[in-house]
Image: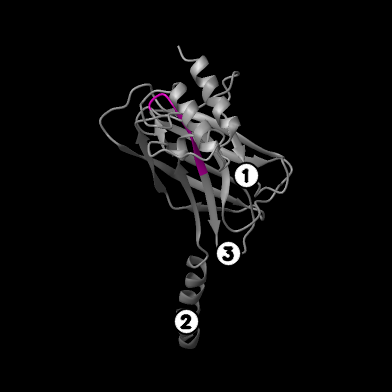
Amino acid sequence: MRKFILLLTVILPVMAWGQTTNNISVSAKAEDIFAGGSSSLVISLTNEGDDKYNGFQFDLFLPGEITLTTDEKDRFTYTFSDRFSSSGMTASIRDLGEGWYRVMGYSLENILITGNEGPLMTLTLKAPEEWGAEDELKGKLSEVVLSRVDGSAIDCEPSEFNINKTQTMMGDVNFSKTVDVTDVMLVVSYILGDIYPDFYIKYADMDKNGIVDITDGMRIVDIILHKE
């Protein structure tokens, strides 16, 4: 019996160590956002082990009266990443109130999440028309659960993410706090090879494809024409 107990004292710590080294985490990263504007919130999964997963859920807290956007049918908008082996994934999102949302990602076709790291899905944030005094806000992910393909589940640690508030908006390429014809002409100059000190490429790349071209300029024109 004493030998058996001694053997357990050796085996159990090794087993526990093997479980804790299988690092699994779900995190979020938000793009900068301005008052009255929108930005992307990317939810990512890192899994350093060999387990396979086919579903996830989490509670999301958004501070500062930031909300998730909805479409014309009042459905929350989202996109899944290419980590899913087909397009058969579905998301269910519920507004819990007071800044909290419950998000579930699942598949009726038992689709697996591929790879060991990278984005799972992207949500779209909407900021209120006016900000308070804080320059940086903190969101939270909690009650994070992953579904294994064997029918079991694993809980992940909660995490926080920053939401940086900016004083400008997409299309305001010279930080003048308004979008006008000057921004259009700065984009045109950039395309033709003339770059001015007050030109901020990040806010000229309207479709966020890493390239500033005439399409971005036309999107800025559209913003100006539809301003109230």
**Label 2 secondary element:** helix
Residue 38 in view here? yes
Question: Which residue in the protein does label 2 denote?
Answer: 10
- The residue positioned 46% from the left and 35% from the top of the image is 203
Task: Give the total of numbered labels.
Answer: 3
Judge the density around disc 1: few (<14), some (14-19), many (≥20) Cα neighbours within 10 Å: some
* Disc on the earlier residue, 3 or 2: 2
The kind of secondary structure element at disc 3 is: loop
Comparing 9 with 214, the one in front is 214
Q: Is residue 32 left or right of residue 107?
A: left
**Could you tell me the amino acid type at mark 2?**
Val
Q: Left or right: where does residue 227 sit relative to residue 151? A: left
Span shown in magenta = 35-42
The residue singled out by tag 1 in the image is 81
Instruction: Reply yes or no: does residue 62 show up in magenta.
Output: no
Q: Where is mark 3, residue-wise?
A: 49
Question: Is residue 25 depicted above or below 226 in this figure?
Answer: below
Q: Is residue 136 left or right of residue 114?
A: left
